[in-house]
Every structure is written in structure tokens, then in C-alpha cells.
Amino acid sequence: MSSGNEIFPSRAGVATQTVRRSVRAAPRSRWSRRRSVLAVFSVVATAGFVAATLVPLVSFPAPAEATQLDPLSLYASAVEDAQRFQAGDAPAVELERASEYTVYVKPTPTPPPQPPAASSSAKRSSSSSSWQPPFVSPNPGSAQAIAYDMVTARGWGDSEFACLVALWKKESGWRVNAYNASSGAYGIPQATPGRKMSSVGSDWETNPATQITWGLKYIQGRYGTPCGAWGKSQRSGWY
């Protein structure tokens, strides 16, 4: 119900407005479809470009190349190369040192000379020269008993008599007739020649007292004491 003053649009005017709206909306829908198509095309083109770029990188090796990349084959090849290098097949590398470089080697210090070791003969002579014979009481009436009386008469002690016993035991064994054919030494003191003892007595060949008297005079005049003569005999083999 309406009043008489109200104005109602006609059906023709409503239809005209609807057509205009549809005409205006049609270009917008066509533009959105174009944008969708362009977006899809750009995505497809980008994917194709990427695929074309990655194809060579993803290429699979040939069967021969796959065999060469086998770990066992690589290990065998490395072992073969190492054996060839040890056998001398590797090329020699010559190293040259620049002339401006010099190498200083610290000399090894020379050790101080060691004193020569004493020979065994020298050791024996030194030990024997320091050895003193012990005193032994002589048998009564023997040549050593006669010598003991003469030694004590000269003021020498028992140690000097022990040296005399050792000295003449080495020279003649205290034998009156001991004779050395090579040197001509004779008697207990081994006088050289034996006839020197004739200055004491004509019985120098058989009398031990004559030989001992001469021998003690010789020792006292030459070495001072029987131990001095004994030391000389130990050092040189004679007195």
C-alpha cells in the first residue's frame, strides 16, 4: 500500500541498470583470467628452464665409467701405482739449492785422547817389581846360612836377606857350579865371567863363602842393598 505521491521505478529502468552492471563486471573477470593464465605459463617456463639446466649434471655414467669408479678397482689401481713407485718407475726429482744459501754444520767435538792401556807384560813387571820376598830362616851349614851371617854383619836386616835369597835363587838356584854357557856367568852370584871372583879367593869355583863374599861386595858397590839389586832384576831381568 502506498500513498499517491510515491514514485516506483519502472521495470524497464531496473533492467537497464542490471545490464549496465553486467557490462561493467565483464572486463574485470576477463582480466583476472588472463592473469591466472600468465602466472601458470611463467611457472611452467621456469620449471622447464631449470630442468634443461640440470639435465647434464644428473647424467648417469656409462657402464665402462661405472666400472672405473668401483671402489675395488680404485684400490687396485692405487696399489699398482704404489708398487710402481717403489720399483723405481717414478721419475727422479732433482732438487737444486740456490747458491745464496749456505749450510753450517756444527763440528763434532773431538774427544780427549785416552791414555794408552798398560800392556799385560808391563802390569806383570810393575806388580812383580813391587813384590818383596818373605824372610825364611836358612838351613845351618848351607850357602844361605853363610850368606845370612854376612848380611847381618853388614848391618842389613832380614828383609834385605829375603831379597838376596830371591835374587840368587832366580840367577843360579844357589848352586855353586851354576854356569851359563851363552854369557859365561858362573857360581851363586852369576859373576860374568866367573874368574872375577878370584879376586876374593883362588877357590872361587867350589867355595860358596868365596862366591857370596864377592857377590855381596858387587851388590853393595852397584845397588847399595840386596833389595836394590832385586828391584833392578825385576825391571830388566838382570842385575
Image (cartoon, rainbow, N blue to C red):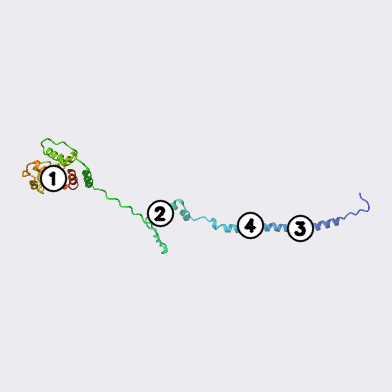
Q: Earlier in the sequence, mark 4 or mark 2?
A: 4
**In the displayed image of the protein, which residue is found farthest to the bottom?**
99
Percent position of residue 95, x then y: 40, 61
Instruction: Name the mark nearer the viewer: 3 or 4.
Output: 4
Left or right placement of residue 59 versus residue 6 in this view: left
Please tell me whether mark 3 sits on a helix, a strand or a loop.
helix
Q: Earlier in the sequence, mark 1 or mark 2?
A: 2
Type of the residue with mark 2:
Ala
Please tell me whether mark 2 sits on a helix, a strand or a loop.
helix
Q: Nearer the viewer, residue 84 or 48?
A: 84
Q: Where residue 217 is drawn, which disc sits there?
A: 1
- From the image, tell me which residue sits under label 3: 26
Please tell me whether mark 1 sits on a helix, a strand or a loop.
helix
| Crowd tier of the residue under label 2, counting other residues whose Cα lies within 10 Å: few below 14, some 14–19, many 20 or above | few
Type of the residue with mark 4:
Val
Q: Where residue 82 is drawn, which disc sits there?
A: 2
